[in-house]
Image (cartoon, helix red, strand yellow):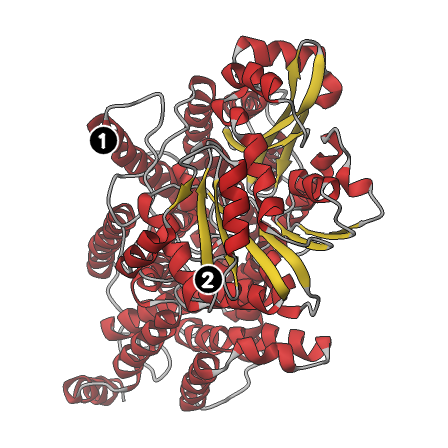
Amino acid sequence: MKQQLQISAFKLSQSKQLLILCALVQFLACVLIHLCSCEIRSLAYFQNYIYACALFGLGLGCLSFKDDRNVSSETGWLIYFMVSCLLLAGAHLSGCGDLGFLKERSTYFILPTFLPNQIQHELLIIAMFLSVFFLVTRGFKSLGKQLGKRIDAAAGSGALFQFFAGSALGWLLFAVTLWLRWPPLIAVAFVLAGFVALHGINLIQMAMVAVCCVSVLSFDTVKEPKPIADAISKYPDSVSKVWAPAYRVLTYPIVAAGKVYGFVVKVNGGLFQPGIYSRLDRNVADQLAPVYGDYLSSIIDYYKVPGLAARTKKKVLVLGSGAGNDVAQALAEGAELVDAVEGQDWLLELASFNPESPYKSPKVRRIAADPRTFLRFSNQKYDLIIYSILESQTAFSPFGSLRPDNLVYTVESFIDASDHLSDGGVLAVSYFPVRGWYGLRLTHNLKLAHLTVDADLHTGFRNYLICSRTGNRPAVEALEGALPEGSIRDSKKLKKEIEDVDPTSDDWPFAFLATGSMPFAYLFCLTLVLLTVIFETCAIQRANPPDELSGDEQGRSGRDRIGLLGLACAFMLACDKAMSTNAFNFGSLWTVSVLSGAAFFIVAASASIPAIVKVRIPLIVFWLLLFLSIAGDFFFNYAALVSIPQSWMRAAISGILPVLPLFFLASLMTRQIVHSRTMTVEFAFVLLGCSIGLMLDAIAMYRGISGLYVAVGLISAVSLVLIMFKPKTADCEIQGVKAVNE
């Protein structure tokens, strides 16, 4: 009976097991980040925290792989993953996933509707961070034990290559799941099947797998008020459930008196944007508002604003065209050409539900591209440019704290937009007033871009900043005559207040921060990870003393391990910087994020090849090339790439230059690890250093993205001193040991 309820593992060589395990570990981390981001609102912006916890757990597991106390390493991860799935399912079904952030002046704060008490909310947020830390760390520690056993068995540079290559494969597999838009059930089943192939499965584990699958299946459950639920069941053709990259998307119809007037797009449980009939009758809008939201009462005025402000609108550019409302409005007002730029292909597909079908018009050019990238490389002129709904509901990548919308609202972005305006052209910037200073931030950016803010309009849906190069008083008068009284804010008062808010640039693009600082929520996560890493590292150093100094290449001191920790920290900071550079060069798209993550591990794998083939290059050469590559990337002006006519040359420079420091940092780490007799311990220090580096990305929030490379240079310099320059006492000890051996 026992044999019938158990599936044996496949017979694979140690190298293949290591490769598959590394791929599954990275894939599991990506899937977990995706699920947490879609189900817990605030965790969508803390992807680097989840990834740091995963790497930290792997590092602890590698260090304790010989310790088989408590839960076995082959089962432990599944228990914690099952608990995580159950908690996420509970958050989804109860609505508790709609969490905001810790309240503070330096960043956005959105108090959830289900918990209006601020103190209770902040305590819940702190409990959530602690729970994530415990569950992710403990689960991946179990996986780290499996990883440590296989690295110890495979020992040598080949094990490092397989780890990095397998990690790259895991990221590529995740890219495939996002591209195919697999629901999480398929992704989770893929992970579980992979681990079954490695370890087999028994009856108890089968039960845990079933619980995981049922929990994940519940994420597709729709919880909406009865009128909306009735509309969903009555008009199934207007309903769509999509697991898009970074988002759980629900689309349902807007219905009144048996007629469909449009649809609503919700992402991760919150309203993203509606696709609605542009000439909706105001009485009908008032009927819809109690069911679908009060914003519908003012949405008619909102979409008319850009057209009222522009004298001529023959050529219109819509950035973030989304469901097509702005496009439909421009066509209705007589536009002869509308360029609709949207970077999220799933949103363009959902626009088919729009009752006016604006994208089918021959006057519309649908452009699937990142809005900022389009502005940088296009040479068209427009009478009206609309910054539509561009705010992001998630972070750009687990590597860093950048958000996809950050580079769209910088001073340089508005300068690019100004260059595309024809004579007398109008720039209309839509924004959601998340904080009182946010509109001031955008106004300050527009002023520094040499644009005049003619009007700041407030509607019940979103706000608009109307801008021009030389001022547009007729536009203000037209708006005052068409909009309700009190909709327009005094622009003179606005200009006086903007100096109190720092502008954002391509180097410091964090629009969600009022000033350069480290938000308390980020500081809390960073402190939690750092203190635990320091505590565990000290305990590990005592439990796993360095090798005996009995050989030139086998000796490893505590200084070497700390230096290795620093190199790994610098490597991850360089990854964060490279990810931000790729977002600027190629666009803040999910493809750029995921493929860049895979590329980082491919670079690390290629850096281990010289050690495999035993190419002898002096260590000082790698150090010299490292600091040269850091300096080269730091001083290179990526904004000047637009002057290079050959696209292949732009792509080559943009793709190679940011990852050169990664190659040399990985080469130095490999040289430090490969000849050690405690290779698994040294490798664990690399994972711990990477987890620290992920959280130290918060430096960018304070000093800008360029500050990351300053940190990379300083940490690398400290590692150089620790590794290359030994104290004389240590040299004497080494000579003494050699003499005794002789």
User: Which mark identifies residue 123?
Assistant: 1
The location of residue 625, given as percent across then percent down, is: 46, 87
Pick the quarter of the image with the N terminus.
top right
Q: Is mark 1 on a helix, strand or loop?
A: helix
Q: Nearer the viewer, residue 154 or 192?
A: 192
The x and y percentages for residue 647 are: 72, 75
Q: Position of residue 393 (x, y in %)?
A: 49, 41
User: Would residue 694 be found to the left or right of residue 246 on screen?
Assistant: left
Which residue does the image show at 41% across and 28% down from the upper left? 97
Residue 126 seen in the current view: yes
Question: Which residue is at 57% across, 63% downward?
Answer: 417
- Give the amino acid at mark 1: Leu
Tell me if 150 is positioned left or right of 350 in this view. Answer: left
Nearer the observer, 633 or 294:
294
Find residue 375 and report its horizontal and vertical position in percent: 62, 64
In depth, the one of 111 and 434 nearer the eye is: 434
Residue 292, image quadrant: top right
Q: Which mark is residue 452?
A: 2
For label 1, the crowd category at 10 Å Cα-Cα, with few meaning under 14, some 14 to 19 and many 20 or more, is few
Name above or below for residue 231 compared with residue 470.
Answer: above
Residue type at the position of mark 2: Thr
**Label 2 residue SS:** strand
